[in-house]
Amino acid sequence: MHDGFIGLPLKTPHITTYPANTANLAVASLHPDFSKWLYNTNVQLMISKDIATSGGRYSMLEFFPFDCPLINRIHIPDVLLDKCSSITDKLISYLSNAFCIMLEIDLYYIPQSDCYKQYHGWQPVLIFGYDSKESTFSIAGFFEHAKYQFINVSADILAHAFDCLSIVDEERLEPSKCSICIISVRDEYTYQ
């Protein structure tokens, strides 16, 4: 890292499953008690296929981020985002205050994504840094070959991928009213 970089020293979490779960675990992994908490309390099980109750799909007991005492999560409603001058300035402000940001974007615009200029696909990504010298954000997500990766994306491209999410929203089964979630480590918590 250098003088022009703000953000958190994120590492790949032990478990990389769904984008939102992985993002929350990545931030939680910065907590000193993360390994103890993960190995003693986190449960994420795949349950056998039951055609009668699940419509032929597998059922799952998922990791729920609001059950994780190692992190603070704050949802930023769309109405508040409309009031900010630019999404880039807002993201930099959160990073400057030791927050990571989970942001839904359209992967169609992300060069490192398999979706790039082929098809629209929304996905939450985790923004954990900003390089003011290069004007790039450091983000984590499932990009090339659906592998969890850390990449750098220009501020302009990321802002465009966020702004164009409305194209994808019409195709979503459950449109979200909240497109941003800021996440920080809950330093005051001690696992016992």
Image (cartoon, helix red, strand yellow):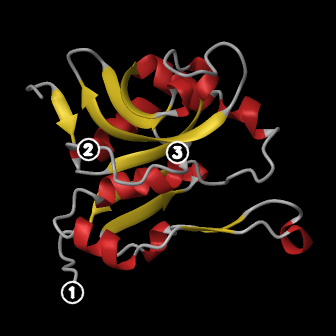
The label on residue 67 is none
Reply above or below: 103 against 181.
Answer: above
From the top left corner, tell me how far across and down residue 29 is, in percent.
27, 57
Residue furthest out toward the left:
3
Q: Secondary structure at mark 3?
A: helix
Identified by mark 3, the residue type is: Leu
Identified by mark 1, the residue type is: Gln
Q: Give how far apart the Cα atoms at labels 3 and 2 are.
A: 25 Å
Mark nearer the N terminus (3 vs 1): 3
Identified by mark 2, the residue type is: Leu
Residue pointed to by mark 2: 10
Mark nearer the N terminus (3 vs 2): 2
Q: Residue at x 43, y 62 (%)?
A: 74
Q: Residue at x 75, y 39 (%)?
A: 169
For the N terminus, the image quarter is: top left
The label on residue 81 is 3
